[in-house]
């Protein structure tokens, strides 16, 4: 596992053996950052299930102004802290020792808004139903959300989680993982998203 772009390109990242940890492969990250754009200068990002930190550290490498990582597993947190120290990234990358809901509550209390959220939770645990409505409370206008799931997302579900202005911009599949880029904005020309 390595950072694939930006100032820390080719930097290796430790992957801890932890239940539910499923690092986002290089190929998926490459596609994602082609969708998002290579330059994230000035944006605030949140990696809600950080694991190896590949998504959040990739965003920081590409110029994000602030990146929040949430991780509950002690060994994974230790590896993330070591990576942040090695990259001298503590001014930009902030590690929350707790779950996604706790991080989102903290951001909401501080009035901080997220421009890009990375959501790749353990599968088949019902996590998205709890986390996505909380995420909606801290998203900036025009925010983008990268979401990984075990099945394709339907528009009706995205609307229920994030509101009627949310839509699926792009989606693809890599093995058993379906990944999506969601946006908080109306469909162009007033078109309705198909469920």
Image (spheres, helix red, strand yellow):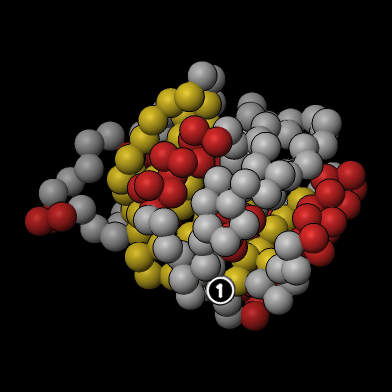
Q: Nearer the viewer, residue 121 or 8?
A: 8
Q: Is residue 17 left or right of residue 121?
A: right
Q: Is residue 34 visible?
A: yes
Q: Residue 68: x, y in percent?
A: 66, 64
Q: Is residue 81 left or right of residue 40?
A: right
Going by the picture, which residue comes out furthest to the bottom?
110
Q: Is residue 12 left or right of residue 142?
A: right
Residue 31 drawn above or below residue 151 = below
Q: Nearer the viewer, residue 66 or 188?
A: 66
If the image is split into quadrants, where does the C terminus sit? top left
Q: Residues within 10 Å of mark 1 (few under 14, many from 20)?
A: some
Q: Is residue 151 visible?
A: no
Q: Residue at x 41, y 34 (%)?
A: 153
Going by the picture, which residue comes out furthest to the top?
175
Residue that carries the numbered disc 1 in the rendered image = 65
Q: Residue at x 67, y 32 (%)?
A: 22
Q: Is residue 104 left or right of residue 190?
A: right
Residue 16 drawn above or below residue 136 = above
Q: Residue 91: x, y in percent?
A: 71, 76
Q: Residue 169: x, y in percent?
A: 30, 45
Secondary element at image label 1: loop
Residue 69 drawn above or below residue 148 = below
Q: Nearer the viewer, residue 144 or 53?
A: 53
Q: How many numbered callouts?
A: 1
Q: Residue at x 36, y 35 (%)?
A: 171
If the image is split into quadrants, where does the N terminus sit? top right
Q: Residue at x 89, y 48 (%)?
A: 74
Q: Residue 102: x, y in percent?
A: 73, 61
């Amino acid at each position: 596992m390595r950072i694939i772009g930006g100032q820390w390109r080719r930097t290796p990242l430790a992957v801890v053996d932890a239940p539910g940890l499923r690092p986002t492969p290089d190929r998926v990250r490459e596609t994602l950052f082609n969708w998002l754009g290579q330059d994230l200068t000035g944006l605030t990002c949140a990696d809600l299930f950080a694991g190896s930190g590949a998504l959040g550290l990739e965003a920081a490498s590409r110029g994000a102004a602030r990146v929040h990582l949430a991780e509950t597993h002690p060994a994974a947190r230790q590896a993330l802290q070591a990576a942040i120290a090695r990259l001298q990234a503590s001014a930009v990358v902030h590690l929350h020792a707790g779950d996604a809901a706790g991080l989102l509550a903290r951001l909401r209390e501080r009035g901080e808004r997220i421009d890009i959220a990375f959501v790749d939770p353990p599968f088949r645990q019902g996590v998205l139903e709890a986390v996505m409505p909380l995420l909606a409370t801290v998203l900036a206008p025009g925010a983008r959300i990268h979401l990984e799931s075990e099945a394709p997302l339907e528009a009706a579900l995205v609307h229920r989680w994030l509101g009627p202005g949310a839509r699926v911009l792009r989606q693809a599949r890599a093995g058993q993982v379906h990944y999506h880029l969601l946006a908080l904005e109306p469909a162009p020309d007033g078109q309705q998203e198909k469920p």
